[in-house]
Image (cartoon, rainbow, N blue to C red):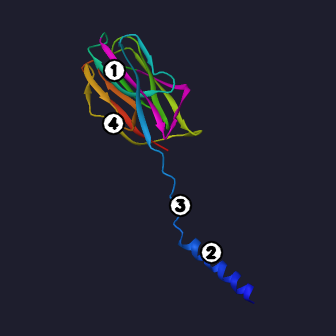
């Protein structure tokens, strides 16, 4: 019986030790970071601009009429130490510039824009699917920026945001607004 009592006491001691042991800390959720990348300034009229592979729009500015200059800012999205994949297959939307309203499909960001002619010309917006670890990212807290006069403005995403849409009404004196969203997973 003595062996049995010693084994029972050892087992009870082991259970007590496991019960009192602190739980292992939960793995920290990786943070999302948008890192500014490529930017370019080009003439607005008859222009076509795409962010480099792996980058999305994070801002745009324009000065003047259709002969003026437009600047695009692109950025890379990181979740933890892994870059978010940006599809090379693009979804294209087309509208007349005087009344253009573009919003990307779910989990898509703006990656390119094309404009032909003046305010009566055609504008195209190009969107790309964003994935992380093989799954589409989630875009939350979508918001529209303040209203800007197209002929003289600059708009950039807040930290953690990317550009997911644009609206414009009228000529270079008309209103432009941008849609931004926070990247999540």
The answer to whether 45 appears left or right of 64 in the picture is right
| Element carrying mark 2 | helix
Query: Residue under circle 4?
Result: 158
Mark 1 or 2, nearer chain start: 2
Q: Tell me how far mark 1 sits from mark 3, CA to CA.
A: 58 Å
Look at the numbered discs 1 and 2 and tell me whether their residues touch, using CB distance below 8 Å: no
Q: Residue at x 44, y 44 (%)?
A: 31
Q: Tell me how far mark 3 sits from mark 4, CA to CA.
A: 35 Å
Mark 3 or 4, nearer chain start: 3
Query: Residue under circle 2?
Result: 14
Q: Where is residue 150 in the image (x, y as percent from the top left)?
A: 27, 22
| Tag in front: 1 or 3 | 3
Mark 4 nearby-residue class (10 Å; few <14, some 14–19, many ≥20)? some
Query: Residue under circle 1?
Result: 98
| Element carrying mark 1 | loop
Vertical position of residue 122 compared to residue 169: above or below: above
Q: Tell me how far mark 3 sits from mark 2, CA to CA.
A: 18 Å
Mark 3 nearby-residue class (10 Å; few <14, some 14–19, many ≥20)? few
* Residue 24's disc number: 3
The answer to whether 3 appears left or right of 71 in the picture is right
Q: Position of residue 39 (x, y in %)?
A: 38, 20
Mark 2 nearby-residue class (10 Å; few <14, some 14–19, many ≥20)? few
Vertical position of residue 171 compared to residue 27: above or below: above
User: What span is colored magenta in the figure?
Assistant: 68-95
């Amino acid at each position: 019986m003595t062996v049995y009592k010693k084994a029972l006491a050892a087992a009870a001691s082991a259970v007590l030790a496991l019960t009192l042991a602190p739980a292992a800390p939960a793995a920290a959720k990786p943070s999302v970071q948008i890192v500014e990348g490529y930017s370019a300034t080009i003439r607005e009229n008859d222009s076509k601009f795409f962010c480099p592979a792996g980058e999305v729009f994070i801002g745009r500015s324009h000065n003047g009429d259709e002969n003026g200059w437009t600047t695009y800012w692109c950025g890379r999205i990181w979740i933890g130490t892994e870059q978010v994949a940006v599809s090379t297959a693009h979804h294209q939307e087309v509208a007349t510039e005087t009344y253009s309203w573009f919003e990307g499909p779910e989990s898509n960001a703006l990656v390119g824009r094309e404009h032909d002619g003046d305010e009566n010309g055609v504008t195209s917006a190009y969107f790309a699917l964003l994935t992380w670890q093989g799954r589409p990212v989630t875009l939350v807290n979508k918001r529209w920026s303040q209203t800007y006069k197209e002929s003289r403005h600059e708009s950039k995403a807040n930290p953690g945001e990317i550009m997911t849409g644009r609206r414009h009404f009228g000529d270079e004196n008309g209103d432009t607004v941008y849609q931004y969203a926070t990247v999540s997973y």
